[in-house]
Image (tube, helix red, strand yellow):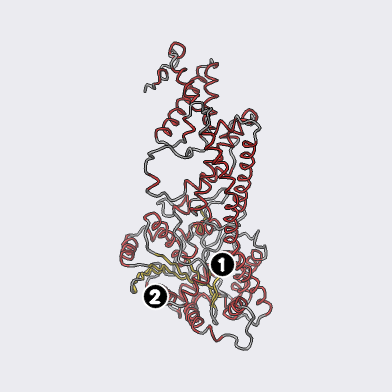
Amino acid sequence: METETSSFETSEMLSTFLASTPLLSESWRLCNISNTSTPRGFLTEQIGDVGYIAFSGIQTVGNSEPSCRNLVPLMESDGNALFIPLHRLNEGEEPVMVHAGLLQLFLSMHSSTSFQNQMLALMEKSKPIVITGHSLGGTVATLCTLWLLSYFQSVSSPLQVLCITFGSPMLGNESLSKAVLRERWGGNFCNVVSKHDIMPRMLFAPEASFTQLHFLLQYWHLSMNCPRFGMLAQLHDEDKAELFRLVLCHLEVIAQAGEEVAKSLFWPLGSYLFCSEEGAICVDNAVSVIKMMHLLLMTGSPYSCVEDHLKYGDYVEKVSLQYLNQGSFMQADIPESSYESGVAISLQSLGIYSQEKVAKPVKDCLKTARRMGLRPNLNAAKLAVSLAKINPYRAQIEWYKASCDESDDHMGYYDCFKLRDNSKKGSKVNLNRHKLAAFWNNVIKMLDNNELPYDFNRRAKWVNTSQFYKLLVEPLDIAEYYRTGMHRVKGHYLKHGRERRYEIFDRWWRERKVSVDENNKRSKLASLTQDSCFWARVEEAREWLDNIRSERDPRKLAFLWENIDAFEKYARKLVDNMEVSRDVLLKNSSYNLWVEEWSKLKSQPKKFSPQFPDYVNGEVIP
């Protein structure tokens, strides 16, 4: 079953939807009310079938400074298991990290009875739920949305959730952004950012002093609550200039690092709606978002970067007007293509169309965002075509398995391939095995290089296909490993010979959504043994059986008996549950021969009963 997706797969769809509905203006209206009437709190409101929850921008970030030096792993901080889907990581990924103070803000609200009761009431009455917040309230809104999406996923709720933030600082690292994309939640987040507002950019500058941030937040909080009090906490001009310089400098370093190497402690999450007095544009590629933040801040000043944080009401109104007046743009100079027209409209929406120094880099940034946004899905489409081309190789291996299972020697698939001669049929299957491995290794490489959609490993098509490939082909890899004696050189397959791709496919399969039908007990043998490493376990059990005949050390003998007994129970459970293919039970299969040898060994009580009475006669005495 496919992962539930957001209604908005592209930034264009999301921005058009928001501009053409009251959601953006209603969200800001409630944020504004929350800032003045519920400092450090939130409010809820029902408008038709839409439920809103708005978090105040006037918040206190614990006792620590609101800098980026205080990131914590989400998994270790999630004592109540509120964000379980975000705990799943791909191999080699850094842990999901979030700002400790901002996380604590949400957790303290979530633990309150008032919050729980109002959220339950909202869920009962609403179809869609809009979660919004200004400034620090925006990060609380983001965490609330992540929690609600995680909860809805666990209970299979059909309710839709949309998060709209205004001037919100970054929340977490790149792993958080990737985890959200893997769950296909990116379209559930829209971050409205005015083109000069320093707040969404502030955490890119770790050297910003606590004093500067303290007075800036105090000024903003007083201005939100009562504008005439804002002057009481004004930041000195030289401090504004220094903060502006620091943030601009760090953004420039990250933005100019290039799309392959750009790194930062914090990373954009979801879509970003950049707005100005002329209108707005929407970008959802993280690298391009950072570049846009840098380029637009270049056009600002120390004064505007502070004051823009308080002007979202004006900008929201302009976004709606831009949507209504799109047809009146540039009558005298219409670009040749519709795409170029769109880029030109975007430049005018940001008020930089005539600023040559910034307009060209922004134009290049938008083109890069478009290219990078399309590339992963195009790569996935190409892989689907390549998969269709290699399917004949898999089909030939399936035919080979069927012929082995029906052969007169009664050995079956695994043993026929392991003991094969130099016949054309065996060589062809071995070649196909290598071709399929090359295809899947390339898939893993593309995933490692972020060349595929982040939710690629959650898509049912690829999860199911990789699982079938693993069950069909890994027994051949095991057979070849033992056929060539690699176990004597490197050690047994399970610890020393298994390819990384199979371990990755195991994880994909474990993390899939399981349907009710998959939990039903089998009524006939499986077409493929459900443990793709079954034959590797048989090979180890065969060695244990050989060793037990010659071993004299009582402790080592006890260890061998325990291992053999554990394998027998495991294999018997697979057989009883019909999770093995018929080739496992054929007369001359390695497994069947092992069972016979093991039964004979247990039937020799005189030889073993004095030392191991619990294991003889086919019984284990507790």
User: Is residue 76 visible to us here?
Assistant: yes
In the rendered image, residue 84, in percent from the top left (x then y), is placed at: 44, 52
**Relative side of 389 to 171, left or right:** right
Density class for disc 2 (Cα within 10 Å; few <14, some 14-19, many ≥20) is some
The tag earlier along the polypeptide, 2 or 1, is: 2
Q: Which residue is mark 2?
A: 33
Q: Amino acid at mark 1?
A: Met
Q: Classify the position of the N terminus by image quarter.
A: bottom left
Q: Nearer the viewer, residue 109 or 213?
A: 109
Q: Secondary structure at mark 1?
A: helix
Quadrant of the snapshot with the C terminus: top left
Residue 363, given in percent of the width and then of the height, sits at 64, 74
Query: As rendered, which of 337 and 582 lies closer to the eye?
Result: 582
Position above or below: 193 against 396: below
Q: Position of residue 490 (x, y in %)?
A: 63, 31
The residue wearing badge 1 is 202
Q: Residue 523, position in %: x, y?
A: 37, 39
Residue that protrudes farthest toward the front in the picture: 408
Q: 175 or 549, which is in the foreground?
A: 549
Q: Quadrant of residue 212?
A: bottom right
Q: Residue at x 60, y 88 (%)?
A: 331
